[in-house]
Structures are given as structure tokens and as C-alpha cells.
Amino acid sequence: QLVRAQHVVLLCDFDGTLAPISERPETVCLSPRVKGLLEVLAAWPQCTVGIISGRSLADLKERVAIPGMILAGNHGLEIEGPGQAFVHPISEQVVPLFRLLERVLNKGLAAVKGAFVENKGLTLAVHYRLVEPDREHEVKQLLDRVIGVPRLLGKVRVTRGKKVYEVRPPVVWDKGKALSHILAHHLRLKRVRKAAVIFLGDDTTDEDAFLVVNGLRGLSVRVGRDERPTAARYSLDSVQEVEDFLHRVASLEAEVQPWPA
């Protein structure tokens, strides 16, 4: 499928897909080999490479400084790459509210060892990976109390990932919408009518992107040995297998012939 394609679009989640999940998000980084493979793919004219992550755009830019790559932070609420810069218009409205919620949540979570709040500008992440199992319910109870009124007023919504709650703006925007936005813009920029699309992800927030890729008859790939139902049509067991997969895609460069302009 990739060899026959006019263009290849390879988009990935970051944590748990390109890099192993860590107890603290600030300690996560790409391995030299994965970064090298992404650099090779980003330099290939017939391939577009990008990351769609729950991390902020600023965080991604710090960890993935690779020319030519598309980076989408906060589940696609902010996107930057060659020829495009997008920030969802809701951003100006949510930043002050999220600063206030961050202060209140931090004060309440101070009594729960291991819990902490990460302010990503357009979203908040309440992490509880380091919390003792018998106290995890306290994190959920506090979160429900703090965001109860804003959620009732339609000011925020909450999604759940691997040992994290995401407090997000009340907009119908997710990784699937971000993927569609990137495709529409980038293929027009590249003057490409059709592309083979691949998306790799490991968490529940990646399911929206899997559904979009399936509709395009692309390759939706879930990473990890998760028994939960998924829309992904293919799977890889680990970050190591993702690395091997990237190597296989990069090796196709000699076989994919450029299409005439």
C-alpha cells in the first residue's frame, strides 16, 4: 500500500508510542535511534511525518526539534509545521480558567502523595501514576468537586487516559479532528490528491484518530498489549516494535517513486 501511494503521511502519538511512558512526563525523551529515523522520514519528499500528542506544543518542540515535522499539541488544539500554524480560537477563553483550576487542584491534591497537576496552557493533566492504588479514588473525588460547576456550565470537559485525567476545553475537537485538519492543509500544500495515511497511538484519546484513518482506508495501529476494545486495525506490542516499524517504512524510500508534479 505504501509503495503504491502518491504520498505517505505518518502521524504518531508521543508517550507510549514513540517513547516509553514514565512516572514523570518531564523525564520522557526520544531514543537516538527513533529520533534518527524520524529525521530520515521527515527529509523524504514523498513522506510527511508528524506527532499528535496530549503534550503542549511548546513541550513537543523542546523534545522533537526535527526540521520539516508537523507537531500538534494539546490533542491538536495547537498545530505547527511547514506552511501551517493553527491555534483553536477557544484558547483565549480557557487559559485564565485553567490557571485558576490549576491552583485549586494543586491545593487539594497536596494531601495525596504522588498526585500532581500539569498545566499545558490549553488543557490540564491530573496525573496519579505515583499515587497508591487505595488512594486513587481521592484524586477522582477532588477533581469532580473542583470542576463540578465549570463542567455543569459547559466550560470544561474531562477525558481519561493512562493514569491521567485530562481537563479540556468544551469543544468538539480531538486527535481525529486534528488529523483531518493536518491532512487537508498539508496535502493541499504538497499538491497531492491522495495519500496513504498511518496513525500510531496507545491510549483511549487515540481512538478518534483511528476512526478517521479507517475511513480513509489507511493503517490504524494501536501500540501496547491492551485488552480494551479498539478501532485500530493493526497492533504493535511495544515502543521497540514501533521503532522497528519506522525502520521498515524508512527502508521503502528507494521503492516509492516520485509522482509527477
Image (cartoon, grey):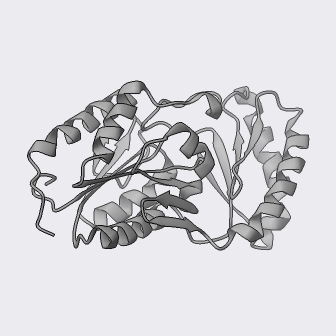
- Decide: is 29 above or below 220: above
What is the count of numbered marks? 0
Q: Answer yes or no: is residue 56 visible.
A: no
Q: Quadrant of residue 164?
A: top right
- In x, y percent, where is residue 140? 75, 45
- In x, y percent, where is residue 183? 36, 66
Q: Answer yes or no: is residue 32 visible.
A: yes
The N terminus - image quarter: bottom left
Q: Quadrant of residue 40?
A: top left
Question: In the drawing, does residue 167 fall left or right of residue 76?
Answer: right
Question: In the drawing, does residue 189 fall left or right of residue 30?
Answer: left
The C terminus - image quarter: bottom left
Compare residues 72 and 239 and report the one nearer the observer. 72
Question: In the drawing, does residue 50 fall left or right of residue 108?
Answer: left
Q: Residue at x 40, y 25 (%)?
A: 32
- Decide: is 6 above or below 35: below
Q: Residue at x 52, y 49 (%)?
A: 53
Compare residues 35 and 171 and report the one nearer the observer. 35
- In x, y percent, where is residue 226? 42, 38
- Decide: is 248 above or below 211: above
Q: Residue at x 14, y 43 (%)?
A: 252
Question: In the drawing, does residue 230 fall left or right of residue 253?
Answer: right
Compare residues 207 and 121 and report the one nearer the observer. 121
